[in-house]
Amino acid sequence: MDKAALTKYILDKFAGKVDLLDTGKVEPVFRLESDFLLEFCRAINSDETLHIDFLCNIAGVDTGERFEVVYSVASVKNRIRFDFKIAMAYENAEVESVQSVWPGANWHEREVWELYGINILNHGNLTRFLLPDNWDQGYPMRKNWDAPDFVRMPES
Amino acid sequence: MGVIKKLPVYLEHFPGGGIVATSLDYVLSQSQASSIWYLLFGTACCAIELMATGASRYDFDRFGMIFRASPRQADLIIAAGTITKKMAPRLRLLYDQMAQPRYVIAMGGCTVKGGPFYYDSYAVEKGIDHIVPVDVYIPGCPPRPESLLEGCLTLQKKIKKQKIGDWS
Amino acid sequence: MSAPFRTEEFLVNMGPHHPSTHGVCRFLLTMDGEVVVKAVPYIGYLHRALERICENRTYHQCLPVLDRFEYCTSMSCEYAFCLATEKLAGIQAPERAEYLRVIMLELNRIASHLIWYGTTSLDLGAVTPFLYGFREREDILDLFEMTCGQRLTYNYIRIGGVSRDIPPEFIPKLKEFIEKFPRKVDDYEKLLTENPIWIVRNKNVGILSKELALGYGVSGPALRASGVKFDLRRDDPYSLYDRFEFDIPTGTVGDCYDRYLVRMEEMRQSLRIVKQALEQLPAGDIKTKLPPNFKPPKGEVYSRIENSRGEMGIYIQSAGDSKKPLRVKMRGGSYNQLQVMPEIVKGGKIADLVAVMASMDIIMPEVDR
């Protein structure tokens, strides 16, 4: 399935609930609302044409205006790859866990929670693992994060 | 004792053999310097160069350097690789577990002063010399095996100059 | 009547300083005698905040940081980042540069597998393979060194090309290596493949089923050893990999022994690719000129390549008006391989944990970043 056909298929199947973000020549990126996330993941996982069985990556993003959580997924069987993302405001940022669809999401989501402070609902194991156990300086990947011993590179 | 002050080793001839006369300081420091066993402590990129130094081409064994897995058997920590804030207490713990006399080589830019992670990193310890006392610094990212060998030779020189009274 | 015989469960801490954890991984093991009841990995001892650093560097300055992301195959890290940026900005590297990239990537894959070969056997108690593996690895490093001056962190592949052309003595040296390396791989196999101790330690140990592997996002040789014929070089081709002929070795059972065999065969296949690339190597430019103030347009991309440890993906989001990326996320194969470990070591012996970890070829900077 090529890029155009894939885009059309997904936009038709989830009409009204999924938008396409224009990203030029690269793989399609879709945008959806956070309350539709789990349903969407289950649907693309069980759909015969798509059969998305492989979660590549989950990335938290702080764009400076809002949070985004980007899911990169692929199908090993059907050679499909695309991204979808959820945008949310800084306040009460939370998304549903997708572990029930892809168990490998566990650590990726934990990382998003740990470094960005985006709450993952129904995760079950939100504990620190990248930062030291006694870390008390907040969420270091946020753009406005700062600490006394944090040295920024001088602008050249 | 006049002889020993001039020469570290003095051979006294006796009928049927000889007796080597030397100072205890000399014998101990020489033998200590020639068999430094290092702790296999690699955290990041430098660990690969440490392994390469121990392997076929560079052959660490020539200098009597053999790796040990346990700090109790080791004389030297080669801190190879980045020490993060999470790892720093463990490095101190390992150092404390070693028997004296003990030495530390800071291998690579990260252990010297944070290296490429000095700026913009919230997790990296900026140099290990405020965690453990360092004897030899080897800059580089990562240092070549030759640099590491040179560093070890420098450490040997240092050990050879030591007296028993310096052990602490 | 006396109570039934029961053993007490106890906790064993393994790591972060442990010679067989390939870095600074820590396991907290709940043991029943010698049997692992539960294994909980603790990571982060090498978390260096590479992603945060990349956000504060220009695209060109990111490359040395990427080198340290997965230092056994630095070339792939650089390449994954360059590929993502090139996709984003619509740049095409010259053909000669692409060929040079392929040669370097595949040589680097062999070098990485040689490290794996040496350390894995060291973990399981065989010291000779370590010396053998590192001997040939030095030959590859010589080739890299004469090209870019570094042994480990190359900074060779740049956005839009490579940093410099290969020197004239490179090709004869490489031909010599191509000539002799297959015999060396035979030697390696002779040492271990039919070694009874090796077979006992590896066969039917740490079986990873196909479903578990896919669910947990396991990729690369570990996935192929479980019987899934999936290789990004063939299935999602990047660079010039569709021009070369090579086989994708797969396993059947998914145990440590299969993972071993798959990696050994991969070394041969990588050499085949190098050979073909060298034959087809055209003359020409090695770099596309980029403006000094290089700013990719607004957008985002996740690009993935087949690394020696599985899928290496780089996610870049660009704001469009900045020389610096808004977000760089690195995804390494080891991250998911380590995540699945508790599932496959459960119920095995503690010594098997070492074998499984070694055969998965987990390397901590890829996990912690």
Image (cartoon, grey):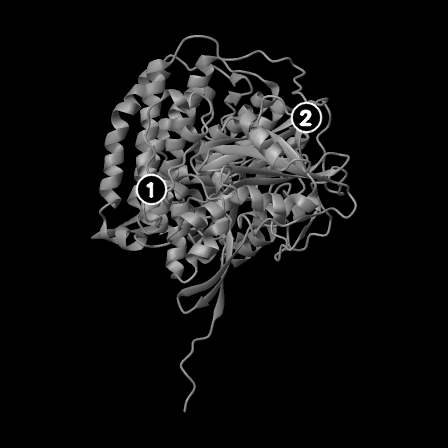
Spot occupied by residue C241 in the image (x, y as percentages of width and height): 41, 23
Label drawn at residue B155: none
Front position among marks 2 and 1: 2
Can residue B80 be seen from the camera position used here? no
Q: Mark 1 — on which chain does it sit?
A: C
Residue found at x 53% / y 44%: A45
All told, the count of numbered labels is 2
The quarter of the image holding the C terminus of chain C is top right
Spot occupied by residue C87 in the image (x, y as percentages of width and height): 57, 22
Q: Residues within 10 Å of mark 1 (few under 14, many from 20)?
A: many
In the figure, residue C90 lies in which quadrant? top right
Q: Which of A6 and A80 is in front in this view?
A: A6
Q: Nearer the viewer, residue A68 or C171?
A: A68
Spot occupied by residue B157 in the image (x, y as percentages of width and height): 47, 40
Say whether residue C251 is left or right of residue B43. Answer: left
Q: Nearer the viewer, residue C191 or A154?
A: C191
Spatial separation of the CA atoms under disc 2 and disc 1: 41 Å
Residue found at x 38% / y 61%: C349
Q: Nearer the viewer, residue C182 or B47?
A: C182
User: Mark 1 belongs to which amino acid?
Assistant: Phe
Q: Residues within 10 Å of mark 2 (few under 14, many from 20)?
A: many
Residue found at x 37% / y 35%: B58
User: Mark 2 belongs to which amino acid?
Assistant: Lys
Asked if residue A32 is positioned above or below residue C163 in the image, the reply reads: below
Q: Which residue lies furthest to the left in this view?
A: B16
Q: Name the residue under label 2.
A: C324
Mark 2: secondary structure: loop
Asked if residue C363 is positioned above or below residue C106 in the image, the reply reads: below
Can residue C149 be seen from the camera position used here? yes
Q: Name the residue under label 1.
A: C130
Spot occupied by residue C22 in the image (x, y as percentages of width and height): 45, 46
Q: Mark 2 — on which chain does it sit?
A: C
